[in-house]
Image (cartoon, helix red, strand yellow):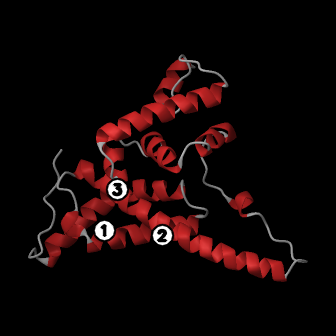
Amino acid sequence: MQGQPPPAPDDPPAAVEVRFEDAYRSSGTAVLGYALRRSESREDAFDVVAETFATAWRRRADMPADLLEVRPWLFGIARNCLANASRSNARAGRLGDRLAAAFTDAAIPDPATLHEHRVGSREVHEALGRLSAEDRELVTLIAWEGLTPAQAADALGVAPGTARVRLHRARARLRADLSGADDPALPDPAHPQEADRAR
């Protein structure tokens, strides 16, 4: 299914708005899900989504013509927004540590206990955590966000062949990690339908 062409600089404002609204309606929920699964709080995720679509609006001339390619394009923008937010949070965290040291009698809750958006078992998340950040993002773009390997490659800015090789190796590491041994019969954690068939 082909979408409308990206807006040209001389498009009337109404046409530009319609194209942007189409992208928002078709991919807004998916971008929110992407942000929720990678943010420390709902508020952080909402901020990432807002920044993603603000950036998409500024870059609307670069929006892919094919609606099927809009979602990975938006995920690529969201990934950069998350990285910026993470750097900001790290700076805020260092300030918080200094403040906490000044108030040693106060009970400071562990932020990890407040996280409410992780999906799946603890073992799966621990296994994902042992992958490199790039491999983890590749696997979760496909498993959680439903992208194809080629679309995930586009979102990550890597060649499709590179993404496929990294995905194959990451899946093998996950299977071995989750099974405790090399078990080729273990369902691929990046493909939930395989797990369903194995039940």
Image coords of residue 58 (percent x, y): 27, 74
Give me the residue at 26% from left, 50% from top. 69
Between the residue at mark 2 and the residue at mark 1, the CA separation in whole angstroms equals 15 Å
Image coords of residue 26 (percent x, y): 31, 55
Residue at image mark 3: 27
Can you say which quadrant of the picture contains the N terminus?
top left
Answer yes or no: is residue 131 visible: yes
Image coords of residue 121 (percent x, y): 66, 39
N-terminal-most mark, 2 or 1: 1
Q: Quadrant of residue 76?
A: bottom left
For discs 3 and 1, the disc positioned in front in the rendered view:
1
Residue at image mark 1: 56
Indicate whether 73 appears above or below 188. Answer: below
- Disc 3 residue type? Ser
Give me the residue at 30% from left, 68% from top. 56
Between the residue at mark 3 and the residue at mark 2, the CA separation in whole angstroms equals 21 Å
N-terminal-most mark, 3 or 2: 3
For discs 2 and 1, the disc positioned in front in the rendered view:
2
Give me the residue at 15% from left, 67% from top. 7
Q: Count residues near mark 2 (Cα–Cα under 10 Å), then give few for <14, some for 14-19, many for 20+.
A: few
- Disc 2 residue type? Asn
Q: Secondary structure at mark 1?
A: helix
- 11 sits left or right of 95 in the view: left
- 128 sits left or right of 62 in the view: right
Residue at image mark 2: 84
Q: Decide: marks 3, 1 in contact (CB < 8 A)?
A: no
- In this view of the protein, which residue sits in the foreground, 26 or 147? 147
Q: Count residues near mark 1 (Cα–Cα under 10 Å), then give few for <14, some for 14-19, many for 20+.
A: many
Between the residue at mark 3 and the residue at mark 1, the CA separation in whole angstroms equals 12 Å
